[in-house]
Amino acid sequence: MVEKKKRERPAFNRSIAAAISKHYKDVQTNKPMAYLLMASNPLVEIAYAARIQPAFPENYACACAAGHASAGYCETAEAYNYSPDICSYCRNHLGYIYGPGENPPTGGIGEPDLLLITSSACTHYFKWWDALHEIYGKPLIFINTPRVMEPQSKPDFYMDYAMREIEQAIGEIEKAVGVKITNDKLSEAVKLSGEVVDYWQKLLEMQKAVPCPMDYSDLSNALFVLIVLAGTQEGVDLMRETYNETKQRVNEGKGILSKDEERHRLLWINIPFWYKLGIFGYFEDRGCVFPLSDYTHHIWGTTRMDGSKPIESLARKALEGELNTSVDDQIDKLLKDAKEYHIDGVIAHSNRSCRVLSVGMLDAVDIIREELNIPALVLDCDHTDERVYSDAEIMNRIDAFLEMLA
Amino acid sequence: MSSVLEQMSSAVSNAPAVLQKMKRNTGCRMIGFFHPVIPEELIYAAGIHPVRLFPYFDDSITLADSQLQTFLCSYLRAEWDQIVKGKYPYLDGAIIPRSCEAVTFLYQTWRRHNPYQFIDYINVPWKRSENAISFFAKELGRVKRDLEKFTGREISKDSLSSAIEVYNRNRELLKKVHDLRKSKPPFISGLQAYHVVMSSFVLDKREHNGLLEQLLTELSRRPQSLKAEVRLLLSGGCVIDSRLWGMIESGRAMIVADDVNNGSRTFWHFVEDRTNDPLEALAKRYATVPCGFNTSIADRFKYISEMITEYEANGVIFAINKNCESEKFVYPELDKKVKDKLHVPTLNIETDYLIDMAPLRTRVEAFVESLKV
Amino acid sequence: MALMFAGIDIGSASTKAILMADSQIISYHIIPSGSDFAESSQVALDEALNKSNSAFKDIAGAVTTGYGRYITEINAEAVTEITCAARGASFLCADTKAIVDIGGQDTKVIKIGKGGRVLDFVLNDKCAAGTGRFIERIATSLGLGLDEFAARSVGSMTKLPISSTCTVFAETEVISRISKGESLDGIIRGVHSALAARIYGLAQRLKIQEAVVACGGGALNAGLMKELRDLTGDITLPPTGIDPRLLPAIGAALIATERYALNPVKHSKLSRPGV
């Protein structure tokens, strides 16, 4: 059997971990607090501009999964009639609400004063916030964005609609919390968010280096900064630190694996198994790294933000992220990036919870396999509900795939 | 049974043959679509026959697995399976709404695997605000231009207005039929009402209007003798399996009202074109259709509670298809409201494509027994 | 004398041990896996050794495979049954392009290139309706043995389709239909046909059209094979005399042979408790 190695992680992970634990303290104490969706969400910057503390139940689901608490929460939600067909992020949170238990991970996520939602991801989220609105009776403010099915020929009135929706939401938020969101404050938040995005884009670019400087869990840690802290100086500072360290690693030729160890560069499609992030270590022990994933590269952080045009920037953010576009858009981006990141194999997580990233995936995998002539493995699983995961079955498929690559 | 009802139910069960024959006789183009949120008038005004797509209950799903995972709606998978197998030779294309993700993303799958057909999508808003409706009207304008390009013929304002007229007449008549279920006992059974509505998805609307008029006359002359000790409201998304409607009504219960895609949601609201702007009028009407994906729990509860009161339902059956996440997500809170605020008992059953009715029958019978006074 | 190599396939349903030398099968043994994989792998290997009058120390190298490949105390290299089955199939029929392996736990479709190299593979998703368990459960609930169950399917002129794709619901459906007086054999054929359709759908995902070899326990079921042939003409069984369940074990023994040739020192340290 292959030896399991302990690898030294980049130091920025510690700073991010500190930011995460600060965030979970803030959501308990800061008021007013609003629930927000992670997706490519224009409401994050607006919340910071309005001095509203944002909290992210999806991120909380990841934290619960990592702490192996999700299966229990999903079961509780099911006992309250939420079907296993519903996304496990939602079930995790609803289960937490109905039965948090004595020691919820991170100390819990608190009760919101406000519910802010966009349709730029999927129906589950929209329904989720609507259920929360019923449960908590707190104001629900909803930005409806059209799905961009054909990014190449996006009609102009899509932008108009998104901008008007955002303007209207700003008015509703001002009314709900009694704060004026001035242009200056909004511009500042959008400008800071733009700086985070710029560092993020440079960071992703560096994943092209051989050996690959970061692994998938480092990148998904940095996603916390990109999404949750978008619009804050703290976010800019953390992303800069992450970028600087990674740049230094690249300059020194330092990778997660050494240049000799790195034998395969794989593409991961869809969300990881949050309860089993160790799987990336398993791959690394066998010479495989993941420099590219739609989840890290294409869903968020793709829109350049301009502080002088805040509403327009936020509208573009809402429309352009891959969760608000289409399968063809996903395939085009993956085909292009797979070449640039020197990808030679694909692991695709057919994630029963995430329809928006899984419907059409079988076609996507077929096309990538044929166009790039690289092998691909589809794993049927779930991002948070650990009960769906079967170690023997998943590892057997991965082992066979690795044997095929060798 | 009335001869008109027989005609309607045969149009539903023989839909492929009926449509094939219509195609041969008239040579008209046909476009398929999902959900009651696609403004059919637009298709109709283009001189194209709109066909609401449902799978036929006759074949197991084999080929669809290559494109659609088994955790997606089985009705949609069956539908796609039958499309891939070439069972809809009369279709010239489809329009896909932005609804649940399984349906929405079929747009590109369809285009990839049936590249020679017309294929379009409509961004149906999930909101009923002024912003949303004005956006929707522009979106319909885009689709209108796509359809004009496809047929090579302009869709005039007049043809749109006259399509709206035909469709409003259809809604009016369907509502009259639906209202026959208000009386005690109802003048028409749920299963019969199912066939009445489902046949409107197959037949030409003018022809269907003629049949509806005949049916109303027939039923007023010779009322049926039906029995309904227990009056039920049926709620769900696509409750399209006729065996389920028949099974529920095989005992002492009758479905007196429904809140389903292939039922009242289709005809409940009228198009009101007050400003002579048909696209805006269509947008307003179709943004209001209370489907699972675009409607809040509060709005659904309003819709359902008015119906429960008006049609004097003693119980509600939620029949939701496996993996229909929009409906399943609304269910827990909606169910709570129906029980707590209206004090009406409910039953939840899960349907599936080609499901065996026996286990469902046990649940339904026990529920009906519990409701009997 | 040629060196002897062992392939041990510890599957969820049965454990197979095979001994090969000079690319020839010397002996093999198949037993139910039971709940103790370590025990069953020892027993199967001992029986195979007995049959060929040889001893553990005579084995030059071995590879374990199957779900229990790590849960054995025989200290051999582990390779997945997907790689092994492909190797085994191509050894038996050189022009094999694909395998359909219908096991108890899962159904696999494997696309094969030159020399038995795996080009691509798919497995059924998490649902017993796509595996041999589907047939097994329904046979058991009717109180019929698997052989009789298959024979009745082959003998039936009619085919009554089973509508439920869920194994549990299919069981109740079958029983309620039989109690209504529908043809038992027609229903049994419907059960086989339902599984064949799902396997066919899986194979379609790899767009496989030619030279398929069936293996695994499911390949022993004549009823299932007949329905599969109705869907896809070009599906064959391994050559006469070779139990279709043996393919991964044969592949494992062949891989052991190759690895030994590359590095005799590394690949010959075979041990087990007490030896």
Image: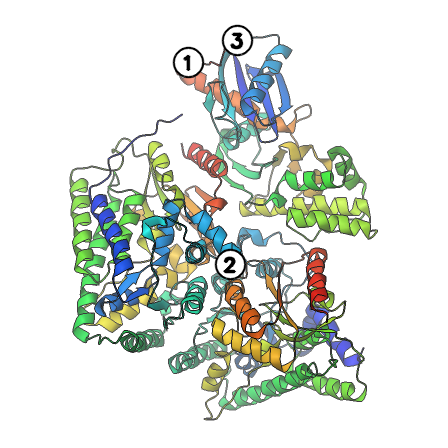
Image quadrant holding the C terminus of chain B, namely bottom right
Camera sees residue C177: yes
Label 2, secondary structure: give it.
loop
Q: Nearer the viewer, mark 1 or mark 2?
A: 2
User: Label 3 crowding class (10 Å Cα cut-off): few <14, some 14-19, many 20+?
Assistant: few
Q: Which residue is mark 3?
A: C58
The answer as to whether the residues below labels 1 and 3 share one chain is yes
The type of residue carrying mark 2 is: Tyr
User: Label 1 crowding class (10 Å Cα cut-off): few <14, some 14-19, many 20+?
Assistant: some
Q: Which residue is mark 1?
A: C264
Farthest residue toward the top? C1
State how far apart marks 2 and 3 are (Cα): 60 Å
Q: Which mark is residue A333?
A: none
Camera sees residue B117: no
Of residue A150 and residue B276, the one placed in the foreground of this image is B276
Q: Chain of mark 2?
A: A
Q: Residue at x 62, y 68 (%)?
A: B345
Label 1, secondary structure: give it.
loop
Q: Earlier in the sequence, mark 1 or mark 3?
A: 3
Q: How is the image coloured?
A: rainbow
Q: Nearer the viewer, mark 2 or mark 3?
A: 2
Q: Nearer the viewer, mark 1 or mark 3?
A: 3
Q: Which mark is residue A82?
A: 2
State how far apart marks 1 and 2 are (Cα): 58 Å
- When the figure is inspected, residue A335 is found, relative to residue C275, above or below; the finding is below
